[in-house]
Amino acid sequence: MGRYFGTTPIFYVNDAPHVGHAYNALSVDAVCRWHRLLGDEVRFLTGTDEHGLKVMRSAQEAGRSPIEHADHNSGRFRDAWAEMNLANDDFIRTTEPRHHAAVQAMLQRAYDNGHIYQATYSGWYCVGCEAYYAEDDLIDDHACPIHKRPVEHMVEDNWFFRLSAFQKQLEDWFAATPGNVTPDGFRNEALGILRQGLEDVSISRSSIDWGISVPWDPDHVFYVWYDALINYATAVGYGTDQEQFDTWWPSVHHFVGKDILRFHTIYWPAMLMAADVEHLPTVHVHGFLLLGGEKMSKTGNVTKVAPSDLIADFGVDGFRHAVLRDHPFGPDSEFSYEALLSRYNVDLANNYGNLVSRVATVVAKKCNGIGPAPDPGSPLAAVVATAFAETAAAWERTQPSVALEATWRIIRQTNEYLQEREPWKMDAGPDVDAVMGDALEALRIATVLAWPSIPETAELAWKRIGMPGTVAEQRLPAAAQWGLYPGGVTVETGDPLFPRLKLT
Ligand code: MSP
């Protein structure tokens, strides 16, 4: 048994949640749920990023004060996450007093340690990214490479973080910690940034006041990124509850999109070092969900898809499963409604849902509605054992789509097994009982393993096959052992769990 502290980035409140955001948060939820099944102590943190120029300007456009705007949009993320059945243990907002205290404590510590100094800064700033760009990185006529909009030239008296001083320590950390950034391609990208050599970074702004003030210079607020990154530490008691912090921090795993890799794999670990925090995070990086080849986001002409629209069509679990299964964690992948629909129909309507109803119908007809016990020597036992090992290994590598593919192999092969034996054509008796006991047992195990993607439906199926308690209470690897379906319990028929859907 261990601990797992999984985090999403905190989402900017200038925008409403879209499927790109949802994909990130769902991945964390699913991996955390897997760890819950392993019996680990789990903490899942998400929240909203509410300071900075970008939020200030979008508040102005919306005719609201920054805090009214933040309240409004933060609420939309909270509601969307609840609608998606995310089991987050906390939802942090950077405008909360607990966060102000932690930011000031951590940066004061870095300042006291001599890692922060004052200097004048001038550079090209993209408000969309809330980041400065080197002239060489700009495209067209001084436009941001991500937002494709003109950057602004800014000159400011700033506080700087001596990032350059951490070059060697960061290199040592990468050398000593092979899995600190996953997948490997993104780890190489982080190493590439490191190899280019690090320059000091500006961490304060005097031009705006929508932020957390610098404790030793109240005319400045911390630049939004250095306020934001600290949320992860705030939420587990940094600066207020050392015991809680020591408990959770060593197990922290950040899930981030590739656009914010540099902040999480270089700047943030260096800040932690500057504030004498011993443990550094593990970072899991994913690509973008694209629409028409472009990152789904607010800028440009790219349309955004709201999770609630897809949930209306596919149901919560249909949405969760299709998104997690169809978008491998790592590469960019094109979002397509048709692909999700087809995934829903294949995996859920035709395979999982069909297996549940088929089994219940045959048991009702041929076994008086009482589920028989499985055969210890069933050919399905080996199928399950292999698929379980692959499922577990893939979750361990933070590869939800691969894990679900392995789990669904159990479901497909059980359907094939039924197709071959055709118990519905047999006379009631030991032969039918043997086939149905095996199918029920495979279904029981598949249901436990599928819980991270379809938590609500898995519970329904669990009840239908007559299992006591809940899936959430099951513990792996014990629950994946062949032979635990008790037999002699009532199996219920019911409405299809995942009705087949047509393209409208
Ligand atoms: N507020 C910062 C994060 C601070 S964390 C200390 C931020 N916010 S964001 O709302 O712009 O993005 C949040 C996350 O959503 C990022 O990981 C980003 O990569 C992800 N995504 C935004 N659009 C996305 C897609 N189209 N596809 C996949 N992920 C996407 O950055």
Image (cartoon, rainbow, N blue to C red):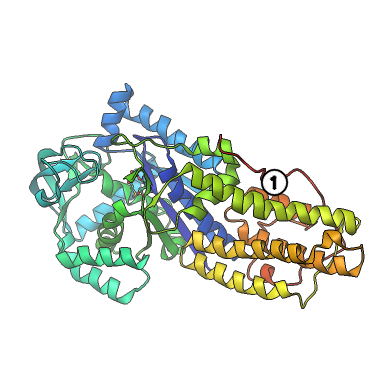
Against 141, residue 327 (above or below) is below
| Image coordinates for residue 427, horizontal then vertical, percent | 91, 63
| Quadrant in which the C terminus is drawn | top right
Task: Please identify the residue farthest to the bottom as the structure is shown.
Answer: 377
- Which is nearer the eye, 275 or 138? 138
In the figure, residue 286 lies in which quadrant?
bottom left
Q: Which residue is mark 1?
A: 497
Residue 150 can be seen in this image: yes
Q: Is mark 1 within 8 Å of ligand 1?
A: no
The residue sitting at 43% across, 46% down in the picture is 335
Q: Amino acid at mark 1?
A: Leu
Question: SS at mark 1?
Answer: loop
Q: Residue furthest top?
A: 63
Instruction: Please state the horizontal and vertical placement of residue 377, each as a whole percent of the image.
Output: 77, 78
Mark 1 packing: few (<14 Cα in 10 Å), some, or many (20+)?
A: some
Residue for point 64% across, 74% down: 385
Q: Quadrant of residue 184?
A: bottom left
Task: Using the rendered image of the protein, determine whether residue 465 is visible from the camera's viewpoint.
Answer: no
Q: Is residue 300 left or right of residue 122?
A: right
Q: Quadrant of the N terminus?
A: bottom right
Left or right, residue 188 beside residue 247: left
Out of 475 and 110, give the one closest to the viewer. Answer: 475
In screen coordinates, is 285 left or right of 218?
Answer: right
